[in-house]
Amino acid sequence: MTETVKIDAPRDLVERLSRRGADVEKIVRDALAREAEQADREELHRLAREASTILQKVPDDAIVEAIRKSRDEH
């Protein structure tokens, strides 16, 4: 599924790229994909920091016990 996106770009910029045979639509799609990937990475880093903060509050012996219990169940 696709979504139509309208942007206002400087005419000279688009013309310069088009004159050189650049696929402006592909450039925009690629830029959107890069931005989405960057946003995903930033969200994952934020979640990892949040999880780390929470896990630091759990005593080591509780983590060890949970791992042992998990191994015993499998």
Image (cartoon, rainbow, N blue to C red):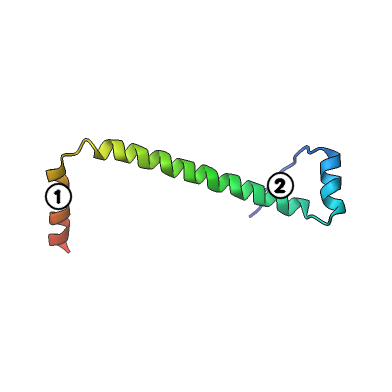
Residue at disc 2, secondary structure: loop
Number of the front mark, 1 or 2: 1
Which image quarter is the C terminus in? Answer: bottom left
Judge left or right: residue 63 versus residue 50.
left
Judge left or right: residue 48 versus residue 73.
right
Is 52 located above or below residue 73 in the figure?
Answer: above
Q: What residue type is labelled 1?
A: Val
Residue at coordinates 79% horizontally, 39% vertically from top-left? 9
Q: Where does residue 62 sit, x and y in percent of width and height?
A: 14, 44
Residue at coordinates 15% horizontally, 43% vertically from top-left? 60
Query: Mark 1 — residue?
Result: 64
Q: Where does residue 46 sit, x and y in percent of width and height?
A: 41, 38
Q: Where does residue 7 sit, x and y in percent of width and height?
A: 75, 39
Q: Number of labelled discs?
A: 2
Query: Mark 2 — residue?
Result: 4
Residue at coordinates 79% horizontally, 55% vertically from top-left? 22
Residue at disc 1, secondary structure: helix
Residue at coordinates 64% horizontally, 46% vertically from top-left? 32
Question: 74 or 54: which is nearer to us?
Answer: 54
Which image quarter is the N terminus in? Answer: bottom right
Q: Distance of mark 1 from mark 2, alpha carbons?
A: 52 Å
Is 34 located above or below residue 73 in the figure?
Answer: above
Q: Which badge, 1 or 2, comes first in the chain's sequence?
A: 2
Q: What residue type is labelled 2?
A: Thr
